[in-house]
Image (cartoon, rainbow, N blue to C red):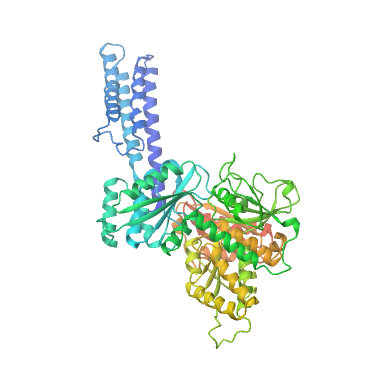
Amino acid sequence: MADLPRSVIACLHAGKLAFLAILVSGGIVLQILACALYNNWWPMLSAIMYVLLPMPLLFFAGSDTSSLLSESGNSWVDATKFLTGASSIGSIAIPAILKHAGVIGWGALAMELSSYFIFVLAIICYIQMNDDDGYSVKLSYGTSGFRADASILQSTMFRVGILAALRSLKTQSVIGLMITASHNKVSDNGVKIADPSGGMLTQEWEPFADAVANAPDSEQLVQLIGEFVKKENIPLEGSQSAEILLGRDTRPSGESLLEAAKQGISSVVGVVANDMGVLTTPQLHWMVRARNKGMKSSELDYFDQLSSSFRCLMDLIPQGSGINEMNDKLIVDGANGVGAEKLEILKRVLNGLDIDIRDSGKGGVLNEGVGADYVQKEKVAPYGFGPADVGLRCASLDGDADRLVYFSMLSNSNKKIDLVDGDKILSLFALFIKEQLSILNKDEDEKLNKYYKVRLGVVQTAYANGASTDYLKQLGLEVVFTPTGVKYLHEKAAGYDIGIYFEANGHGTILFSEQFLCWLEDRSNELSSTSEGSEQQKAALRLLAVSKLINQAVGDALSGLLLVEVTLQHMGWSIHKWSELYHDLPSRQLKVKVLDRTAVVTGNAETVVVRPPGIQEAINAETAKYSGGRCFIRPSGTEDVIRVYAEATTQEAADRLARSVARLVDQFLGFGCS
């Protein structure tokens, strides 16, 4: 069945359900007719057996021993199988005894027996459908790792523990395993692996991750692992040692899922699981990177690096800069998650920063009406913010503190905000770094070794607002695009001496190449001996401090927040001046349900549809009707929907463009069985 088109599979599933409903309805009708046609209600005694007959399904649902014919050493399972046998015999015996006693006639007996066999057939069909892979939950490893309702992730955690252990043995490096579902609701959870660099799991291993998570039974799982180990030449004889760092966020399900991951890790000889406790996702990624670079890597070391580099940048703020007193306080929405807890620790060791932390988890629900994802999508203030906060500088973290957005509340009473999203965070950082590079290379002779032609690049996705892209290009910066997903952005940014990437949702970071950092260290040392206190030396020190403050492993809301704060003070800007860098073009995002999202294939960083033929031409024709119009579609990575993004010079035009393109998607990929 897996080889059939998804649309065909969907129709087959719908047909099976309809057939099952017809069988059950037919059995009920025959049972009632056996009584009603002969004005004799004694045959309803069989209904008692029909209540008992499906009971084992309640015991077996989701079990590896769900087959009624399989062997089992469990006494409860055996008892329910006995109950099934007894109720089956009773369903035949009761009408037979009633006929033998002359209570019912041959017609009623025939209907009773027919009803019984129909019910049995319905139950067999149900069991087969329940065991069918087409109905089981399919997990797919993406940028977010695996995510699902926490109640179904125990076996997945065990298997990902094995996967992390194999990755550690293969790379002979420390690997990270983080249990989190980021901005998802509190009942969800997930798991992702951090590679030796501190970045995402290499894309080459993602298909193996999918196969491991979805292996239907332990026998096939062992076979799959054995084949992969042989193919990758991974040592399993125990001669090599390896270590996995584990972290989890504050979700109630995290502790039990972490234990399942530990069991998976310990099942591989020579691999040790090191529980780092409750962490933000970026903290775990930072620790993995630091360990593999031979640096200090505890949580205390993380806080020390952030606080010391922040203080260094604060000390280098030019005289006369500073935000006026009205904007001195920063109010932070902690999303009722782990970020609020860690920011409290940072707050105690920082000087020169007044932080008021809201939504810290005391009585609030994780990500419910709070958090960066909520604020960025809904464009309203989170729970806990009110009229007293109007005009103040506010920031919002997400559930595991890898996203960051800023906002200020408007004066009206409906909690509307002026959003400063990831695009504007990127623009602020790009402006600051470009300024420092200009100072550093000012008046240098290109013929001398002192001069370094730095490649500064900005990486965006098609979801970046067109106004932000125009602004960055006007600054003279190189702007490139990648498909949606942090793994693509990070990889592209790593190709520059300094690569900056941020998604509009507030996830992003700044990457510095090792070659550039080595040159910068040498240049800083030279300037300290020849031009102590010069603007060039200060610029070099600022760039070095930024490279230590920002988390180069992954997007980090805590380090990003500190860098935003010190940059605003360096510029002497309020949040309102920052927000005025450019004005976003009005946009609208929609999603259209389809049978098969894989029918849409995109190119050119997801801005052009390659397949199906004809749809891109139709989108172009529709977009041309709107001044400043821009529109693209892309398949979702997790559900059968096509996402539509549209921009135009007015909100009404953006809405109309998005709706018209959504209709085109429905026409080309219409939902339903055909």
Residue farthest to the front, as pictured: 529
User: Can you say whether 422 is above or below 542 in the image?
Assistant: above
Can residue 613 be seen in the rendering of this structure? no
Residue 588 spot, x, y in % from top left: 62, 56
Can residue 448 be seen in the rendering of this structure? yes
Res. 538 image quadrant: bottom right
Q: Residue at x 29, y 18 (%)?
A: 95
Residue 151 spot, x, y in % from top left: 43, 40
Residue farthest to the bottom, as pictured: 447
Residue 397 spot, x, y in % from top left: 59, 52
On screen, residue 319 versus residue 514, left or right, reads right
Nearest the camera: 518 or 459? 518
Q: Residue at x 48, y 59 (%)?
A: 286
Residue 221 spot, x, y in % from top left: 29, 49
Res. 231 image quadrant: bottom left
Res. 32 image quadrant: top left
Image label count: 0
On screen, residue 580 versus residue 444, left or right, reads right
